[in-house]
Amino acid sequence: MKESQIKRFTLLINLAVVLLLVVFVYFPGVFTQGPASILNFSWDSQPLFSGVFTYAHYDTPVVTTSCGYDYPSGCRIVNDCTDCHEGSCWTRVEDHGPDPSCCVPSAGSSCTVFNQCGQAGVGVILCNGSCSASAPSLPPGYGSSCTSTPNSCNQTNSGTIGCSGSCSATTPPNPPGYGSACNTNSCGVSGGTINCSGTCSGSTPPLPPGYGSACNTNSCGVSGGTINCSGVCSGSTPALPAGYGSACNTNACGVSGGVIGCSGTCSGSTPALPAGYGSACNFNSCGMAGGTIGCSGSCSGPAPSESLCNSAPTASNLQPTQGNN
């Protein structure tokens, strides 16, 4: 071996020894964790090499963590669990994740995270006890104010956007009776409809002239009907009683006692005949009558001649002369 090569070899050995001394002084954990630990060094949590573990050195007092490890108060937790040895802070981080010995007992179990609508996001419990899932996003506009669809009067109710993404407000009801016919007259004709103010849009329309009045009345005052909604009579003129207005109860002289009335009977009784009506009258000395009492109440003829008394009596001169005087 040449002298120059020997010098170079010696220099390399010296450098290696110095490097080991530096590591021993500033990174004592390397020698307690085995050769694999040398693959990854860090200073102030900044990795020096890529490997299995990360180390950081602090010259500060040692405190105890919630997971039971002591570490300097200036140490930063790089992952789920922190170990501290001889004033050095290091975190065990394996290639496949945190060392299970550093995790909470329930790590790896399924977990759910709910949003305000009760919708769940499913994940697993991490080493630090938190869930890997995120709550599902809420519907667009959730919780924002909104209005219902308007009713027929353009009135709305207020609400908020709910979990279904729709508005919680319902359409207000129309006013009672809205759209119904109102101010209706006796013929069923309405003046309008109930409007948004709850009142009728028009007044009651008038009835036809004479509506309800008797019509087609006969001479006896009996009507055939009444004026209806079309303005005409509901019936025709009723017939009068048989013989209405005719003379009735007429005596032998042709004098009537009355006329047939609305009840169908005669308005009066038969009139009396003149006194002595039909009796012989105007006798001569031999008892011969000149006539009979007529409708005028007088004798129908004069007394027979006295000369008739000397002649033999016959049937003709014994009968009174008839007449209607």
Image (cartoon, rainbow, N blue to C red):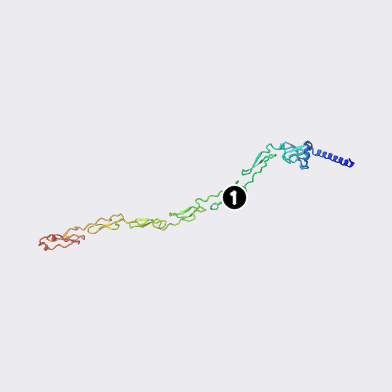
- Estimate the x, y position of residue 116 in percent, counting from the top left: 62, 44
* Residue that mark 1 sits on: 146
Q: What is the quadrant of the N terminus in the image?
A: top right
Residue type at tag 1: Cys
Disc 1, SS: strand
- Along the line of sight, which residue is nearer the eye, 165 or 290? 165
- Estimate the x, y position of residue 152 in percent, counting from the top left: 53, 52
Q: What is the quadrant of the C terminus in the image?
A: bottom left
- Estimate the x, y position of residue 146 in percent, counting from the top left: 59, 50
- Along the line of sight, which residue is nearer the eye, 226 or 127? 127
Left or right of residue 123, residue 31 in this image:
right
Residue 267, placed above or below residue 47: below
Q: Given the current orientation, which residue lies at the most extreme front position?
A: 1
- Along the line of sight, which residue is nearer the eye, 126 or 145? 126
Quarter holding residue 31 = top right
**Mark 1 burial class by Cα count in 10 Å: few <14, some 14-19, many 20+:** some
- Along the line of sight, which residue is nearer the eye, 32 or 66? 32
